[in-house]
Amino acid sequence: MLRSLLHVAGGVIALATVLVTPVTGASAQTTADIVKKGSVTIGVLTGIPPYDTVDANGNTDGFIVDLAKEAASALGVKFEIVPVNNASRAAALESGRVDFLIAQMTATPERAKTFLMTNPYGAYEMRFVAAKDMKLTSLDDLKGKRVSVPKGSTQDVAVSGYGIEGLEVVRFDDDALAMQALISGQVDATAAVAAVANDIITKRNLSNLEVKKDVPLFTLYWSMATRKDATELHQWLNNFIYYIEVTGKLDQLHRKWIGIPVPGGKLPTF
């Protein structure tokens, strides 16, 4: 009888283990795993020059790609860039399509429920962009206006949360499409990274548009992201970001591509 009870108990424990074991799209990545396979796959947000561009061979290049190259070099492995947008980057990470993201994600409390967000590797100033002749000195000037934003972005959350009477938030899959909506006259204004907007205005000679400085949206920071269980890789990335900042490499790359130092001075940690 005792043997029978033990057999039944063992079966119950085994069944309970199966029931409580979480099902995930990909296993946790460690630096040892990445070194063993000899390559790292990094999700990079594209379509937002001057942070990224396209080289002579049609491949994405720029500040974030150079940053990805530095991370791969520090790991001692080859690297593969996977282009993502605001709408697809989370799924790319959750499914295991990429090992981690350098995709200009702000470490919001909501995102931190799903991913491990690193200490920031860069900062940006978010501003409204509109026609020069459009008055925009306060949020009240947006009453009854149409404003484009990338779907699910921090500016989407911010602009939607203002509760401005008659304001229509028009969402697009990425920053480039949101900006194009303004250029083509589909919307009255867009919410964009100031450096990106100024680069577009200059390169495309859009002399009728300007970055509105009287109504700053916010200044925030970009973090890398790993899956929730990739704690060792997350800590390694924090170490990597610290090292390239204190050695001056991060500022060098930012000046190379953006033309200015990383905004905000010394990057915060958390």
Image (tube, rainbow, N blue to C red):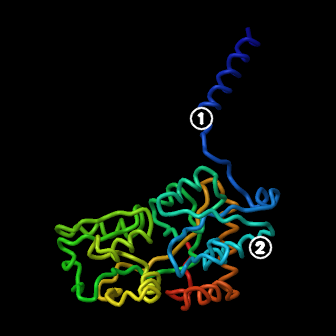
Which disc number belongs to residue 235? none
Q: Position of residue 219 (x, y in %)?
A: 42, 80
Which quadrant of the figure has residue 38? bottom right
Residue type, label 2: Ser
Nearer the camera: disc 2 or disc 1: 2
The residue depicted at 34 percent of the width and 81 percent of the height is: 129
Q: Is residue 41 above or below residue 18?
A: below
Q: Nearer the viewer, residue 108 or 208?
A: 208
Image quarter (top left, top right, bottom left or bottom right) of the C terminus: bottom right
- Is residue 219 toward the left or the right of residue 170 in the image? right
Q: Nearer the viewer, residue 22 or 180?
A: 180
How many residues crowd around disc 2 within 10 Å: few (fewer than 14), some, or many (20 or more)?
A: few
- The residue that mark 1 highlights is 20
Ranked by sequence position, the earlier of labels 2 and 1 is 1
Which quadrant of the figure has residue 189? bottom left
The residue depicted at 38 percent of the width and 70 percent of the height is: 178
Q: Position of residue 264 (x, y in %)?
A: 50, 87
- The residue that mark 2 highlights is 73
Which quadrant of the figure has residue 164? bottom left
Q: Alpha carbon of mark 2 to alpha carbon of mark 1: how far? A: 39 Å
Q: Position of residue 213 (x, y in %)?
A: 33, 88
Q: Tag 1, which secondary structure?
A: helix
Residue type, label 1: Val
Image quarter (top left, top right, bottom left or bottom right) of the N terminus: top right
Q: Nearer the viewer, residue 159 or 63?
A: 63
- Is residue 189 toward the left or the right of residue 267 in the image? left
